[in-house]
Amino acid sequence: MQPESRERAEYFMREALALAREAGSFDEVPVGAVVVLDGQIVGRGYNQPIFSSDPTAHAEVMALRDAARNLGNYRLPGCDLYVTLEPCMMCSGAIMHARIARVVFGARDAKTGVAGSVLDLYAETRLNHHASIEGGVLAEECGGLLSSFFAAKRQRTSLA
């Protein structure tokens, strides 16, 4: 990645991190996402499946929904998605159906990540849409936020 592109990716990942912190403040797993078109954020989302009683309310899905509303189209060609954690299978399906051009993520997810960690849906040639993938942008900060969240949760559980 070129230096200018790295700075841009880090800028948008920091926006996603701010949303992840918001999710964490509601005791949701701290994952945040933004959808970007032509250098402008057009969609924002953070994890809220507990609050909304909705198993599909992952950060990516919420950001895609927001972008689709804002742009007036369920398809989001030319858009990039920045998310603090490698997308899961459900979110990757939504990303592909929305026709997102590029996915940039922070931390890898060894348990449910499907952009190369558990498997790589984005490399599956039989699927009809392929987003380009870039992982590891601000990975330590993104992963640290998740680690801190779960460590605090374990500590609260052990004290109860």
Image (tube, helix red, strand yellow):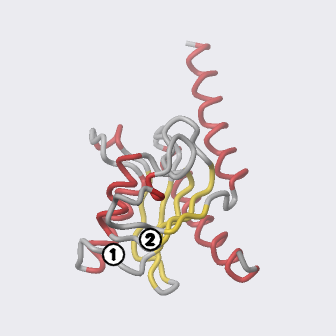
Place of residue 33 in the rendered image (x, y in percent of width and height, measured from the top left): 48, 60
**Label located before the other in sequence (1 or 2):** 2
Place of residue 32 in the rendered image (x, y in percent of width and height, measured from the top left): 50, 56
Which residue shows up at 67% across the image and 79% down it?
Answer: 5
Q: Which residue is mark 1?
A: 76
Seen in the image, is 34 located left or right of residue 94? Answer: right
Element on which disc 2 rests? strand
Seen in the image, is 81 located left or right of residue 90? Answer: right
Q: Amino acid at mark 1?
A: Leu
Q: Amino acid at mark 2?
A: Val
Which residue shows up at 60% across the image and 22% down it?
Answer: 154
Q: Which residue is mark 2?
A: 35
Which residue shows up at 33% across the image and 55% down it?
Answer: 93
Residue 45, above or below 160: below
Label 1, label 2: how far apart the Cα atoms are: 9 Å
Place of residue 14 in the rendered image (x, y in percent of width and height, measured from the top left): 62, 65
Place of residue 100 in the rendered image (x, y in percent of width and height, measured from the top left): 40, 70
